[in-house]
Image: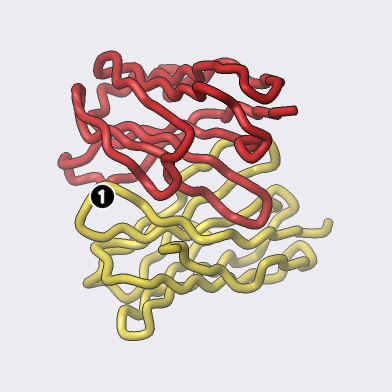
C-alpha cells in the first residue's frame, strides 16, 4: 500500500495564479483532511471531508476550495494564489468509527512558494 | 486559535538521556495523540491516550494525561540520534478534527 500520496512535491507560483494540489489514499478511509504548516505554527486545518460527498471548513479555509472527488481522492485548489499561502501543505486520512481513535495518516507534503 | 502549546519549543540532549515534552490543550477531549515529524517529511502517529486513561506506554515512549490540568507529557527514554525530530501533540474532541500544538523540536546528539 502506498498510504497517502500527494502531488506535486514542490511548486512555485506567481501571485494570482491558480493550482490544484492532489491527494489520494489507498486505505479505504472515510475521512480526509488538508492542513498547512508554517514555521512556529504547527499544523492548521484548512478543510476536511468526513465522508465522500461532504466537505467542511477548518480553522483557515479562506482562499481555498476543496473537492472530494471520490472516496480515494481529495483535492485542494488555490484560485488566486497569494504570498501568504506560501507554506507546506499536508493531506491526511483517517479511519473514523472503526475503533482506531481517529489516528491520522499523513502524506509527504507539498512545498508551495508564492512569489 | 484553538491550538495547544508544547513546551519546550526546542530540546537538545545527549544520546542515552531521557527527553520529556509537555503539551497543554484548551478544550475537553476524547483522546490526545502524539505525532513525530522528521525533517522534510509528513507526520507519523506515535501513540494515543484516551481521556479516561492516565498513563500509557509503547516501547521507549511513555505518555501521561491530566485532564484536570488539560495537559499531557511525552517521555522518550534512552534517546537515540534517530529520535531527532519534531514532536506534536494533537487533541481530539467530539469530531474527527485534531487540534495540533506547535511542536517541540528534539535534537539528540551522538
Coloring applied to the structure: by chain
Q: How many numbered marks does the figure carry?
A: 1
* B25, A95: nearer the viewer: B25
Residue positioned 60% across, 67% down in the render: B77
Q: Quadrant of the N terminus of chain B?
A: bottom left
* B60, A100: nearer the viewer: A100
Q: Quadrant of residue A91?
A: top left
Q: Left of A73 or right of it: where is A18?
A: right
Q: Which residue is mark 1?
A: A101
Residue positioned 50% across, 61% down in the render: B101
Q: From the viewer's perspective, is residue A82 above or below residue B58? A: above
Residue positioned 41% across, 63% down in the render: B2
Residue positioned 61% across, 17% down in the render: A17
Q: From the viewer's perspective, is residue B42 above or below residue B83? A: above
Q: Position of residue A45 (x, y in %)?
A: 43, 45
Answer few, some or many: residues within 10 Å of disc 1's Cα (few below 14, many 20 plus, some between 14 and 19): some
Q: Spot the residue most to the right.
A: B110
Q: Position of residue B104 (x, y in %)?
A: 63, 62
Q: From the viewer's perspective, is residue B45 above or below residue B59? A: above
Badge 1 marks a residue whose secondary structure is: loop
Image chain in red: A
Chain where mark 1 sits: A
Q: Position of residue A12 (x, y in %)?
A: 71, 21
Q: Left of B107 or right of it: where is A55?
A: left
* A77, A89: nearer the viewer: A77
Image chain in yellow: B
Q: Position of residue A51 (x, y in %)?
A: 20, 29
Q: Quadrant of the C terminus of chain B?
A: bottom right
Q: From the viewer's perspective, is residue A45 above or below residue A70? A: below
Amino acid at each position: 500500500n502506498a498510504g497517502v500520496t500527494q502531488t506535486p512535491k514542490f511548486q512555485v507560483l506567481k501571485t494570482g495564479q491558480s493550482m490544484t494540489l492532489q491527494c489520494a489514499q489507498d486505505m479505504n478511509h472515510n475521512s480526509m483532511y488538508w492542513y498547512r504548516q508554517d514555521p512556529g505554527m504547527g499544523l492548521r486545518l484548512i478543510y476536511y471531508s468526513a465522508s465522500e460527498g461532504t466537505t467542511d471548513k477548518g480553522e483557515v479555509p479562506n482562499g481555498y476550495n476543496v473537492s472530494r472527488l471520490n472516496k480515494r481522492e481529495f483535492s485542494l485548489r488555490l484560485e488566486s494564489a497569494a504570498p501568504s499561502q506560501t507554506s507546506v501543505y499536508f493531506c491526511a486520512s483517517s479511519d473514523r468509527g472503526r475503533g482506531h481513535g481517529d489516528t491520522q495518516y499523513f502524506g509527504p507534503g507539498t512545498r508551495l512558494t508564492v512569489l | 486559535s484553538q491550538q495547544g502549546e508544547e513546551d519546550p519549543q526546542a530540546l537538545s540532549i545527549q544520546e542515552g538521556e531521557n527527553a520529556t515534552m509537555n503539551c497543554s490543550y484548551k478544550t475537553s477531549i476524547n483522546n490526545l495523540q502524539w505525532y513525530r515529524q522528521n525533517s522534510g517529511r509528513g507526520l507519523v502517529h506515535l501513540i494515543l491516550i484516551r481521556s479516561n486513561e492516565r498513563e500509557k506506554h509503547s516501547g521507549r515512549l511513555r505518555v501521561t494525561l491530566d485532564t484536570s490540568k488539560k495537559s499531557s507529557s511525552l517521555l522518550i527514554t534512552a534517546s537515540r540520534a534517530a529520535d531527532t525530530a519534531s514532536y506534536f501533540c494533537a487533541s481530539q474532541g467530539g469530531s474527527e478534527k485534531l487540534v495540533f500544538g506547535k511542536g517541540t523540536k528534539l535534537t539528540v546528539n551522538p
